[in-house]
Amino acid sequence: MSQGDFKGGLDRGLQQLRTGLLDPAVTTRPDGERLAAVLVPIFERSGDLHLLYILRSDQVSHRGQVAFPGGRVDPEDHSPMAAALREAYEEVGIEPDAVEVLGAFPRMRTATTGILVASFAGLIPWPLALRANPHEVAEIFSVPIAVLRDVRYRRTYIFRRDGLEWRFPAIIYENRPIWGLTYRITLSLLEIMA
């Protein structure tokens, strides 16, 4: 496959996201809801698209879980998208002006806390100097979209807490389980790009 074919495939995938996602400008803050917002960072490296994930530190909610950069929508945030960009900067150092927001996913609720989450796909430049906020982020890593599509990485993740255990569908890559809301957002992105 030629370099032009690779580039064409990448461009088609990003165009599918642009047309398949919701307009990010119309997302508003619902009254009386606890709302969080995340950025789904996408970048191209060596002819492949990748998603950027974080491993949350043991000092924050959802500790030790794989997630996208994000957090609570604060009263001073003028929109959920602004909150997602602010949180991505605070957690991993992605400058808001460096993100080309491609669109928004339908809002989803976390299974364990019931928080409503607005998520936004954003193209970021690569390479990019990232820095993990040590209070919130234990690790920053990426996964090629081709791996996320590969059924060989689909497993069941067993979540244990307080002597109880729950089973969740997951993508497990390099011993990192992508499950819960992060898994559902990832699947939404893959479905749009299919």
Image (spheres, rainbow, N blue to C red):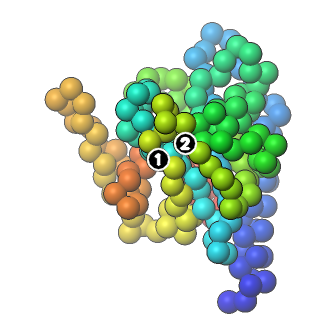
Residue at (65, 22) in percent of width and height:
73
**Is residue 40 placed above or below 125 in the rendered structure?**
above
* The quadrant where residue 152 appears: bottom left
Tell which residue pokes out farthest to the left in this image: 163
What residue is disc 2 on?
Answer: 132
The amino acid sitting under disc 1 is Glu
Residue at (72, 48) in percent of width and height:
122
- Tell me the number on the disc at residue 139: 1
Is any atom of residue 103 visible in this view? no
* The quadrant where residue 87 appears: top right
Is there CB contact under 8 Å for labels 2 and 1?
yes
Q: Return the residue nearer the eye: 19 or 62.
A: 62
**Secondary structure category for the residue under label 1:** strand
x%, y% of residue 138? 44, 42
**Is residue 123 placed above or below 148 in the rendered structure?**
above
Lower sequence index among marks 2 and 1:
2
The residue carrying pointer 1 sits among few (fewer than 14), some (14 to 19) or many (20 or more) residues within 10 Å by Cα, namely some
**Is residue 98 placed above or below 5 in the rendered structure?**
above
The amino acid sitting under disc 2 is Ala
x%, y% of residue 54? 50, 45
Q: Is residue 63 left or right of residue 81?
A: left
Q: Looking at the rendering, in which quadrant would you find the N terminus?
A: bottom right
Tell which residue pokes out farthest to the top in this image: 32
The residue carrying pointer 2 sits among few (fewer than 14), some (14 to 19) or many (20 or more) residues within 10 Å by Cα, namely some
